[in-house]
Image (cartoon, rainbow, N blue to C red):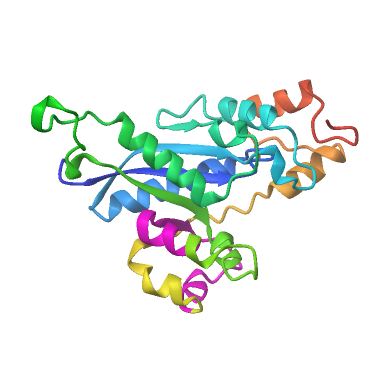
């Protein structure tokens, strides 16, 4: 086990609201990486998007962060990080990855260099940071003007992807259609969810707005929070 490469999984997105599907992505990805025999997942991070993303029906970040914290009360390895949501402007995904990578390096114990000055940590001790996503995100890489090619390359070359398959998405096809993804496919891990999980936050918002039950689609604590703060109804803040 000690020879395995430590990995931190980072998921970026709206989490509007966080659902059980979001949580399952982490569990499926961790199982997949562990089964390779090469990796040991040491942490998962959920990073809700900044309010300035201006997505339709996006509730305030303070609520999305709070709901994620409630959803993760029963997890001993995944946490929510509010940094992205607290910035003055919307951050591109690659900027969020860079931030968390630098935070990872800063948190490692430093070895002493010449003259007792702090030097870089030993390479073997540096965890890899990988972007966790659903197969639908791979598809968005092909959307014109949505992603910069340089950013896609940095994500897959420097960090790597763990992509969990979703029904209706041909993740292998998305890779074969992209020269950048093809070039770095060795750094793209395709995890398969044996139990198809198609919980949609879009549907959850619709159901809440129409008085339908969302029990078992979201953690109970999140449902209570939504009710208490009157979110996702016709007069949501």
Query: Residue 159, can we see it?
Result: yes
x and y percentages locating residue 57 in the rendered image:
79, 43
Nearest the camera: 214 or 104? 104
Query: Residue extending furthest left?
Result: 114
Q: Establish if 208 lies above or below 135.
A: above
x and y percentages locating residue 52 in the rendered image:
71, 41
Quadrant in which the N terminus appears: top left
Q: Residue at x 20, y 37 (%)?
A: 121
Q: Residue at x 77, y 37 (%)?
A: 213
Query: Residue extending furthest top?
Result: 228
Query: Residue 220, can we see it?
Result: no
x and y percentages locating residue 206 in the rendered image:
81, 45
Query: Residue extending furthest front?
Result: 115
Answer with the quarter of the image where residue 68 lies: top right
Q: Establish if 115 lies above or below 21.
A: above
Q: Is residue 210 left or right of residue 189?
A: right
Nearest the camera: 134 or 223? 134
What span is colored magenta in the figure?
Answer: 152-176
x and y percentages locating residue 31 in the rendered image:
36, 48
Answer with the quarter of the image where residue 36 lies: bottom left
Quadrant in which the C terminus appears: top right
Q: Residue at x 60, y 34 (%)?
A: 87
Nearest the camera: 101 or 175? 101
Determine if the magenta segment contains residue 131: no
Determine if the magenta segment contains residue 164: yes
């Amino acid at each position: 086990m000690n020879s395995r490469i430590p990995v931190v999984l980072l998921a970026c997105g709206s989490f509007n609201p966080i659902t059980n599907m979001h949580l399952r992505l982490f569990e499926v990805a961790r199982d997949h990486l562990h089964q390779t025999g090469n990796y040991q997942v040491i942490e998962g991070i959920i990073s809700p998007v900044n309010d300035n993303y201006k997505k339709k029906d996006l509730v305030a970040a303070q609520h999305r962060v709070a709901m994620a914290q409630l959803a993760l009360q029963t997890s001993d390895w995944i946490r929510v990080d509010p940094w992205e949501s607290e910035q003055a402007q919307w951050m591109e995904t690659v900027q969020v990855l860079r931030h968390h990578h630098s935070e990872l390096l800063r948190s490692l114990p430093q070895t002493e260099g010449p003259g007792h000055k702090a030097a870089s940590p030993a390479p073997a001790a540096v965890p890899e940071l990988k972007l966790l996503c659903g197969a639908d995100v791979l598809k968005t890489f092909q959307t014109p003007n949505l992603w910069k090619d340089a950013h896609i390359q940095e994500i897959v070359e420097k960090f790597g992807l763990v992509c969990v398959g979703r029904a209706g998405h041909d993740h292998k096809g998305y890779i074969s259609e992209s020269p950048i993804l093809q070039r770095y496919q060795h750094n793209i891990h395709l995890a398969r969810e044996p139990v198809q999980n198609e919980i949609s936050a879009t549907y959850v918002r619709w159901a809440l707005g129409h008085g339908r039950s969302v029990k078992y689609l979201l953690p109970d604590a999140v449902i209570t929070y939504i009710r208490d703060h009157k979110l996702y109804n016709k007069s949501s803040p």
